[in-house]
Amino acid sequence: MDKIIIHGGKRLEGDVRISGAKNAALPVITSSLLTDGWNTFHNVPDLADVRTIKRLLTGFGVKVEGGKTLRINAGEITSCEAPYDLVRTMRASILVLGSLVARMGRARVSLPGGCAIGARPVNLHLKALQAMGAEIDLKDGYVEARASRLKGATICFDISTVTGTENIMMAASLAEGATVLENAAREPEVVNLADVLKGMGAKISGAGTDVIKIEGVETLRPVEADIIPDRIEAGTYMIAAGLTGGDVNILGCRPDHLDAVTTKLKETGMKITPIDGGLRVVGNRSITSVDVKTLPYPGFPTDLQAQIMALMSMGGRSSIIKETVFENRFMHVNELIRMGADITVDGNSAIVRGVSTLRGAPVMATDLRASASLILAGLVAEGTTEISRVYHMDRGYEHIEEKFSFLGADIGRIKG
Ligand code: EPZ
C-alpha cells in the first residue's frame, strides 16, 4: 500500500486549482441511468470513487467512455445488480437504487455495511421508496426493490440526508405524479444534480431549500453538463494556507458554497479575499482558537471537521469541536495525538488545546477526511510524517501530493 511522506515546515504559496466535486460527480454520473442516449459530463475528478461508480455502471451494461470529460450511454441496461465487492468500497453506491427502480422497475443492491465514521444506515432511502410504492426485501445482505412504476408521494425525511435526497429526487423524476421532499438536504451537490435532471427534462423546483417538488415525467433525455467544484477540497487547501502561514490562491472554487467555512476561518485569523476566479487565503502567524459545530449545509461541513481540528491543534488557546452529523467521526484524534496534539474527546465533542509545535510521526489514515487532516498536520509538524493507508485519501482528493508540492510543500508518495 502507498505511503505519503512529508517533511514539515514549508510555507505554502502560489495557485491551486480545485477539481470537480466528488460528492456531485457521484449522483450526476448515476443520473445517466435515467436516460437512453449519450450524456456528457465535464470537470469530472480523477478519483477512486469515480472509478468505482464507473465500474458499477459498466456492470449494468452501460457504456462509459472518457475521464475528465465523461460520456455515458445507458440505452442498454442488461443487469440491475450492484455487487457487494464494489458497494463495500463505496457506500454512495446506494445512489443507483432509486434510478434503477425508476427506469427498470427493479434493482438488487448490496447493503453498504459499516463504515469508519459511523453505522450510516440507508433506512431513510428505503422508507421513501416504499412510500412511492416500491416493494423492498432485505435478503442475503442485499436490498431487493421492485415497482412496476413508482408513484409520487410526500416524504418527510427524519434526518436531512444528502444521498437520500439525491436518490429519491432521481427516482421521483420518472415516477407517476408529484413527489414532495420535506426536510430535504440543501447541499450544493443536491442543486448540481437537480440542474442536471432538469436539463434531462425533469420537472423539479425548490432544490437548495428544504422542500423539493418533483413532477414525474414519462422519459428523460441525455444531457451535457458540468460538475461543480469541490468545496471540501477547497476548504482543505484554505486550512493548509492558514496552518503554514502561507499565501495561496484557491482557483476554480465557488466562494458562494464556502460561506460558513470562510466565516469560521476568518475568525481564526486568516485573511480571505475574493479574487478573479476564486479566493486568496493568507495565513496569520498566530492561529486563534475557535469553537466549531458541524451542521448540514449551509452550516460548517462535517467533511471539514477533521481538517479544522488539525488547525485548532496549533491554536493559541482551546477550542471545542462538536460533530453533530456522524456518531464516530473522531478517528483522526488518536493519530493527531501521536503527533503531539492535545485533544480530549467527550461524546460527540473534542476539546482541542493548542500546542506550539507538532512533531512528525508514522501515522495511519482511517477514513477519507482523516487522511486530509494528517497531511495538514504533517505540513506544519517538525520532522517527517509518514502516512499509511492513503487509499482512503485517493478516494476523494485528486493529485493531492502534486498540488501540495506545487504550493511548496515537501511531500511525496512511496508506492507500496
Ligand atoms: C453525504 O453522505 C456525503 N457523501 C458525505 O461525504 C457527507 O459527510 C454527508 O453527506 C454529510 O454531509 C456523498 O455525498 C457521496 P447523510 P451521506 O445521508 O448522504 C444518517 C465524504 O467525506 N442517515 O447526509 O451518506 C447518517 O447516518 C463523505 O466525502 C440515516 O440515519 O450522509 C448520518 O448520521 C463522508 N439513515 C446523517 O443521517 C439514512 O437512510 C447524515 O447522513 C441516511 C442517513
Image (cartoon, rainbow, N blue to C red):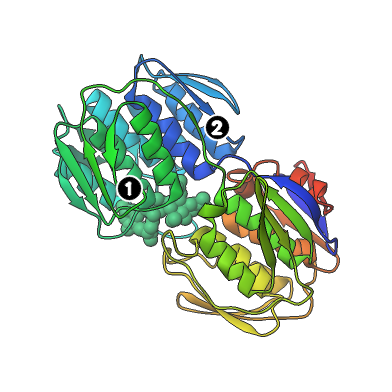
The type of residue carrying mark 1 is Gly
Residue drawn at x 60%, y 38% is 47
Q: Which residue is mark 2?
A: 51
Give the side of residue 316 with respect to residue 11, left or right: left
- Name the quarter where the N terminus is drawn: top right
The type of residue carrying mark 2 is Arg
The Cα atoms of the two marked residues, 1 and 2, are separated by: 22 Å
Q: Sequence-wise, which precedes: disc 1 or disc 2? A: 2
Which marked residue is nearer to the observer: mark 1 or mark 2? 1
Give the side of residue 368 with respect to residue 16, left or right: left
Which quarter of the picture shows residue 365?
Answer: bottom right
How many marks the image carries: the answer is 2
Residue 286 is labelled as none
Q: Nearer the viewer, residue 380 or 392?
A: 380
Residue drawn at x 56%, y 46% is 230
Which quarter of the picture shows residue 62?
Answer: top left
> Quick check: 127 above or below 285?
above
- Name the quarter where the C terminus is drawn: top right
Residue drawn at x 30%, y 60% is 159
